[in-house]
Image: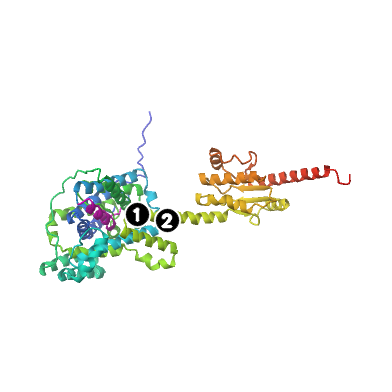
Amino acid sequence: MVMASTTPAKNKAPFFDFSNLRGDIYGGLTAGIVALPLALAFGEASGAGPIAGLWGAIFVGFFAALFGGTGSQISGPTGPMVVVFAGVYATLKGDPALVFSVVVLAGVLQILLGVFKFGQYIRLVPYPVISGFMSGIGCIIIALQVSRLFGHEPAGSGTIPALAAIPGAVLDPNFVALGIGLLTLAIIFYWPAKLGKWVPSALAALIIGTVLSLLVEGAPILGDIPTGFPGFIVPGFSTDTALIVLKAAFILALLGAIDSLLTSLVADNMTRTRHNSDQELLGQGIGNTVAGLFGAIPGAGATMRTVVNIRTGGATKLSGMLHGIVLFLIVVVAAPLASKIPHAVLAGILIKVGYDIIDFAYIKRSHKGPRWDLALMALVLGLTVFVDLITAVGVGVTLAALAFVKRLADTQLENIREQGADIVDPDETAMLSEAEGKIIVFDFGGPLSFGAAADVGHQVREKVKPHTSAIILDFAKVPFLDVSAARAVETIGCDAKAAGKTVYMSGMNTGVAGVLAGLEADHCLPDDTEYGSRKEAIRAALEEIKAADTHKKESLSAEPSPAE
């Protein structure tokens, strides 16, 4: 009879960790209070209404924490997500079935990204691209709120109408709204740090600005806000809007994934832990799916709220879940009070959010770094503001990849050099010296990218001299070949064969040999000139040259002299 082991699994962490319960409670409470004004402001900016922002913070915050892979992360509506969602809301004319089908589909896409383990690849987006689109989103948020700060609403949706409305708003301000808005900005930027430990600056601005608007009337306010649990929304599609829905869902999914994983990295640095990227995407996807089904705006990992949570003691998923519960209680008890909040107060809060998103740290130092990175960042920023986010990210990633491949190819071509003085083995040096330049050795120096492969044949062709008899290709540092590199080797072999020169290969692993054979790129290469080491290849080439020279001398001596 075989007894089952009763030893508990030591490496499996518990789903709920209660070891930091006190810190998680305080962190969750604080994060919930910090999130309140931001959720209202993001909801109002999205077009779906302040209550949609609160429910977005509740659903995404709770479920992303419950199922996510970053213990201390606080999720909810963020500036980048709201900018995209606001565009979707305007494009689809506020049709709930269509608008929130985008959110649901974005959540499903994020779940699939997590299931198929794409988390590690999303983090490969270059920093200048991230800096460019985040700064662009910050500029968009500010542009959308300037008119509201002056007491006016932009005539249309989008960045261009918002920018066009600013001069008119500045020339004809609502002075009550402007005064409240400027006071809001002053409080947020200059709120004492000591008081901030007890009352966050955004919450203080929200309360003070709202109370002031009750005393001095004239500033536009939010008005009636629906209360109670949101109704279930059945996602809908139509042939006319399918492409818009799919594109918007893809943008939201990708942006939310990038935003969340960047925040996860911040949390890792602060807590000295390591998040699970794929699990985090799964949690974010579940949160956004639930949010979309109940008419709430989408969200992602929120850096500022996560930092607040960590600094006030939050360390596990309990803190993020509690943050959502706190907001739920606020919605149930205090939602009617939010109807008195002035638009200018939320505009001031969002302008500060936009300011914080802009990457001033890089912009200030960018002139000291590579100019190409600065140009790429500026291009992505411009495309984000004046075109759309997916174009900006697509163009940015493509150009960054091409630039990297070009730099890598240049480096690889420099490494594909003729070996002479670089050879330190005395036996190899002696044999090459004895060959008197008839043997030339090429060391590939490492993997060959498709960017370098196109010029490899040309590089070898230029360096092979007319008197060269043997070409040695050293593959010792080449772990793999792609199709482009295999074709480059084929070109070298065929050129050598046509010129009557013998190609010797050394250090080739079975994988590289298999690729060459599978693509039939070795048809011009000799069958018997492959050796395990460079020294063996040089020795074989030298023996062949000596044999050829001996044969040539014998042939010359056998010829009759002219005198005879």
Rendered location of residue 389, percent (x, y): 32, 55
Question: Is 306 drawn above or below residue 502 in the view shown?
Answer: below
What are the residue bounds of the magenta stretch?
71-93
Q: How many marks?
A: 2
Q: Is residue 502 visible?
A: yes
Residue to which mark 1 is pinned: 391
Decide: is 412 above or below 368.
Answer: above
**Label 1 crowding class (10 Å Cα cut-off): few <14, some 14-19, many 20+?**
some
Q: In the image shown, does 411 or 556 lie closer to the viewer? A: 556
Mark closer to the chain start, 2 or 1: 1
Disc 2 to disc 1, how far (Cα)? 12 Å
* SS of the residue under disc 2: helix
Tell whether position 308 is magenta. Answer: no
Report the quarter where the N terminus lies. top left
- Report if residue 78 lies within the magenta region: yes
Residue at x 38%, y 58% (from the top left corner)? 129
Q: Nearer the viewer, residue 390 or 54?
A: 390
In front of the other: 376 or 272:
376
Which quadrant holds residue 73? Answer: bottom left
The residue at the point 75 percent across, 43 percent down is 547
Image x and y of residue 193, in percent:
26, 68
Q: Residue 119 in the image: state x and y as whole percent.
A: 36, 49
Amino acid at pointer 1: Thr
Pointer 2 and pointer 1: residues touching (CB < 8 Å)? no
- Residue 521 x %, y %: 56, 41
Residue underneath mark 2? 399
Q: Is residue 111 left or right of residue 336?
A: right
Q: Amino acid at mark 2?
A: Leu
- Res 326 visible: no
Q: Quadrant of the C terminus?
A: top right
